């Protein structure tokens, strides 16, 4: 699977790249939301892990861009701390659009955890 990991943490990106490659996947890592957007336009990923708190284009903005016009057929998992996860839960409840909210992994997130999640997505 082609797996996009967008996060500002260089350690997470390096660990994810190593663990995903070892698990037989093709990782693509991005340090910013705009880089993730560009990578996804060049070649759509099979799954994307996105940090909620990206500085230039945060995770929700990136997911929103991907989903405009139904152009996001891949699963998206946001990575955030407990406060961010609670904010996403409240946003989903307030908007009444739980299906629009991406899945969430609470930090700390490791490369092996991402590889395990991807493995769980395989048929």
Image (cartoon, helix red, strand yellow):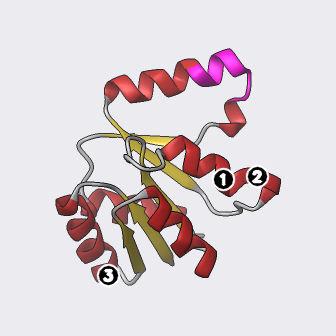
Is the residue marked by circle 2 packed among few (<14), some (14-19), or many (20+) residues within 10 Å?
few
Q: Are marks 2 and 1 in contact (CB under 8 Å)?
A: yes
Is 110 displayed left or right of 114 in the figure?
left
Position of residue 66 relative to residue 89, above or below, is: below
- The range drawn in magenta is 91-97
Q: Residue furthest front?
A: 56
Is 64 displayed left or right of 103 in the figure?
right
In-front residue for pair 111/91: 91
First in residue order: circle 3 vs circle 2: 3
Percent across and percent down for residue 19 are 26, 72
Position of residue 22 relative to residue 37, above or below, is: below
Residue under the image location 34 percent in, 56 percent down: 7
Residue under the image location 46 percent in, 71 percent down: 3
Cα–Cα gap, marks 3 and 2: 30 Å
Q: Secondary structure at mark 3?
A: helix
Is 100 displayed left or right of 11 in the figure?
right
Would residue 30 be visible to someone looking at this image? Answer: yes
Q: Which residue is mark 2?
A: 68
Residue under the image location 33 percent in, 74 percent down: 20
Residue under the image location 46 percent in, 68 percent down: 4
Q: Residue furthest left?
A: 11
Q: Which residue is mark 1?
A: 65
Count the labels in the image.
3
Q: Secondary structure at mark 1?
A: helix
Position of residue 109 relative to residue 24, above or below, is: above
Cα–Cα gap, marks 2 and 1: 5 Å
Give the label, 3 or 2, closer to the camera: 2
Percent across and percent down for residue 52 are 42, 42
Q: Which residue is mark 3?
A: 21
């Amino acid at each position: 699977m082609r797996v996009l990991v967008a996060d500002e943490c260089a350690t997470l990106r390096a660990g994810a790249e190593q663990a995903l490659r070892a698990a037989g996947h093709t990782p693509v890592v991005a340090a910013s939301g705009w880089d993730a957007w560009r990578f996804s336009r060049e070649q759509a990923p099979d799954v994307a892990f996105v940090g909620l708190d990206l500085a230039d284009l945060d995770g929700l903005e990136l997911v929103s861009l991907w989903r405009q016009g139904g152009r996001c057929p891949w699963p998206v998992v946001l990575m955030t701390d407990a406060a961010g996860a609670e904010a996403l839960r409240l946003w989903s409840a307030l908007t009444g659009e739980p299906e629009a909210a991406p899945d969430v992994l609470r930090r700390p997130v490791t490369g092996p955890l991402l590889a395990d999640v991807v493995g769980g997505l395989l048929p």
